[in-house]
Image: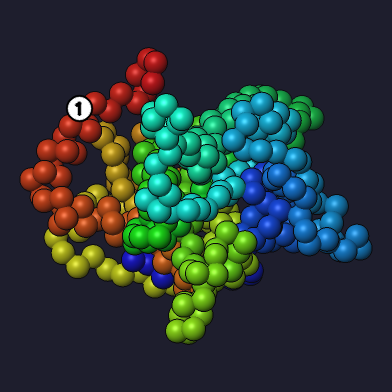
Amino acid sequence: MTSLNITDASIPDLNGKVAVVTGGSSGIGYATACILAKHGATVHILDLNPPREEVDSSSSISSLLHFQKCDVSIWSELSRCILSNPKIDYLFANAGMNERPPFLRSPLEFSENGSAIEPTYRIIDVNFTAVLNIIKLGWHVMKNNQQLHETHHHSAGTAAGEGGPPPSTWEGGSIVLTSSCTAYAPELSIPVYSSLKASLVTLVRNLRHVLPRDNITINTVSPCLTNTPLVPASLSKPVLERGLPFSTPEQVGLALVWSAVGREDDAGVVVEKESSSSSSETSAAGGGAGTGMEVVDWYGKEDVGPGGGVGTLGGKTGRRWNGRGIVVMGDRYKEVEGRFARLRGTWLGEETERLTREQQAATDFRGTEGF
């Protein structure tokens, strides 16, 4: 794992940038929105209700926060809110709900004729299906932004010296998913919630090799227990009584924002990198760039030589932070995906890993028609 030193000073100037934060009216989402606005970004908060905390109208961020009523589980509302933004630099899929009651604590219900009634799982609609839709919609907007940028850049190049248009300020899109440390460490009281959060981590492990083709990065942040309205007292009380770390929304918000704007070679943030401890770990890393962190993982036919990064098969994101997962516990920030990938040969078995890699290379159709 790699230790990160993420502070408010780690966030660059974001003037001219546009961000969308789902579930942005409270807790982690609201903290994320305020950090973005503090650094100059225009932020669209998508949530069921407006923020409870009122921003002083004289505050520099008040004019940068814009609330849009939205139930992320309703496609018509979600698509309207996201597609109303012609430009999106940063998209945060943060909206979520908790599991109440736990999966096997609620009895199976039966109808009057004795037939078992199928349970409903709104938590799946909100915590997973909505995230898929958010990514799909955000990808659409960001891909259009990239195409416009490339067209504009070409036009500006041909018009050089002739009073042509100035270069576009588009630097690429970023999508960040709020997962949970329960994706990595089981929490028996919320098995469905934990499973859905784990699915987001797996989703990023796949999309980190695809989205860079459109100059889009994707990352996860997995907070451990955090002081938000989602956390019931039954979970927070025993942790606090034992003096264990209990994150603030602001600490998690910093990790989310930095995941959208960070770079692999940011020496001010990437302060402690654990070296590979085994030959299998080194070989699985597949090489990497000279400074900063190694390539998090490679897939199929990717070239990960010096200067390469995740998704380099037609990728455009360079050394931007991509395909990573940050676990937040209080003021401790750990990047875990790199080490997880490098140890694949250990936990999967070296021969199984080799054969799996060969299967991936054989079925890597990126760059072919229709993919």
Q: Which residue is drawn at 22% across and 33% down?
A: 360
Q: What residue type is labelled 1?
A: Ala
**Residue that carries the numbered disc 1 in the rendered image:** 362
**Rendering coords of residue 79 (x, y %):** 65, 29
Circle 1 residues within 10 Å: few <14, some 14–19, many ≥20: few
Q: Residue at x 64, y 55 (%)?
A: 29
Q: Residue furthest right?
A: 58
Q: In this view, does 147 lie to the left or right of 166?
A: left
Q: In which quarter of the image is residue 189?
A: bottom left
**Rendering coords of residue 333 (x, y %):** 46, 68
Q: Residue at x 79, y 46 (%)?
A: 66
Q: Residue at x 77, y 58 (%)?
A: 52
- From the viewer's perspective, is residue 270 above or below residue 241? above
- Secondary structure state at the residue bearing disc 1: helix
Q: Is residue 246 left or right of residue 291?
A: right
- From the viewer's perspective, is residue 333 above or below residue 304? below
**Rendering coords of residue 180 (x, y %):** 45, 57
Is any atom of residue 43 visible in this view? yes
**Rendering coords of residue 193 (x, y %):** 44, 51
User: Which quarter of the rendered picture does the N terminus lie within?
Assistant: bottom left
Q: Quadrant of residue 190?
A: bottom left
Camera-side residue: 229 or 272?
Answer: 229
Camera-side residue: 175 or 182?
Answer: 182
Q: Which residue lies furthest to the left in this view?
A: 351
